[in-house]
Image (cartoon, rainbow, N blue to C red):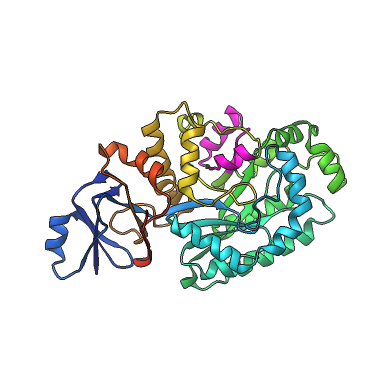
Amino acid sequence: MKLITADYIYTPQGFKENYAIAFDETIIAVDSLKLIMEQFPDATLHYGGEFSILYPGFINTHVHLEFSANTTSLQYGNFMEWLDCVIEKRNDLLGQCDNQLMENKINEMLSSGITTFGAISSFGAELEVCATSPQRVVFFNELIGSNPAYVDTLYGDFLERLKSSQNRKPHEKITPAIAIHSPYSVHPIVLKKAIGLAKEHRLLLSAHFLESQAEREWLESGSGDFKPFFEKFFKTSFPVTTINEFLGAFENHQTHFTHCVQATQNELQYLSHHGHSIAHCPRSNRLLGCGRLEIERVERLEIPFCIATDGLSSNYSLSLFDEMRATLMIHDTQPLQSLATSLIQSVTSTAADVFGLNIGKIEAGKEADFVMIRLPNAPISLSDIPLQTILHTKKVCEVYIGGQKIIASPTF
């Protein structure tokens, strides 16, 4: 049995002062420091230090590790120019992305408080690294392939990768899952097969959806910037599905849709009605010239959303603190304090609910995954803590996963 306390603890009831946690692998009790000490008089108490805040471990629901070698190799500013560049540079970047590099990026996520992440895997190359990482990993095996001549081969490869992730040992903390690349890149026949697998095995589902205006034009009319792209690389002039057909395939299985920047009000209403959620990657959207997800509409429709980093093919770090700071600036019409509060919730309890994992909250019975941060000075009020946390935190001081302390390093 271990005890931990901080100046402020983030609980489902808000920030608590003079509180403590009793835990082993799971959280045993959360109560006032006085009562916890009386209940567990023989346990050792650890204090996080002056201006400390204890949060649940942060959750990055959408990250690509396979392109972690990219820094300046890809063209930003326009989605189609970026995509052309990805096709051109793909083999070089994949060749440079060895296990050591991916392990370094996973450790960078850990140092910024990410105790769980959703790895979107196109080739399965990062499975071994994810299996040995200290974090919990939802491993999304990605399905891609729209050309009828190749879909059977690609689907067979997808099944092999999925099987490999399903055969991991429990201590590796891998949760197998399925990702659908996008409506423009997956043939509806194999899409239905994959969703059927997800239903049969109760696997989490993720899908990129309406990231760019070019995608919308292609799916609606077979025109726009995607037309020459598909003619050049895939020898086709017609999309394999429509927006409504694609969405309809997910009707009876809750799915975590990524981006949704170009989704209409009706399409967002559909997501809301069917219990889907959204991974919002604002820095990626900005760098690829895709526009801004109107999270005010998402919130009005009560669609759960999570802030996520995407991968380093369209970002410059995998830090959720960097991502949340950018979100504060991009969504400049939102009230600052309430937006900051929503962002903290989006990477803790909301993300845990999306993943269906027993984490994301500091309350009895949850897994003992939490992180300690320290502010440079005392906040002026409890309601100001989320904003000051986002503004002033680059690295966390301590990380606990399953009750075990993983790192302890100075914040400043």
Task: Write down the region rendered in magenta.
Answer: 258-287
Across and down, in percent, residue 91 comes to 76, 59
Question: How far from the left and from the top, in percent, is residue 141?
Answer: 63, 59
Q: In the visual, does 44 lie left or right of 141?
A: left
Q: Looking at the figure, which quarter contains the N terminus?
A: bottom left
Q: Is residue 279 left or right of residue 54?
A: right
Residue 162, by quadrant, is bottom right
Q: Is residue 278 magenta?
A: yes
Residue nearest the viewer, comparing 388 with 382:
388
| Residue 287 picture location, percent across and down | 63, 40
Q: Is residue 151 left or right of residue 274?
A: right
Q: Nearer the viewer, residue 391 or 202?
A: 391
Residue located farthest toward the top when viewing the structure as drawn: 333
Image vertical order of residue 373 relative to residue 392, above or below? below
Looking at the picture, does residue 24 appear above or below residue 391?
below
Task: Name the image quarter holding residue 92.
Answer: bottom right
Q: Is residue 143 magenta?
A: no
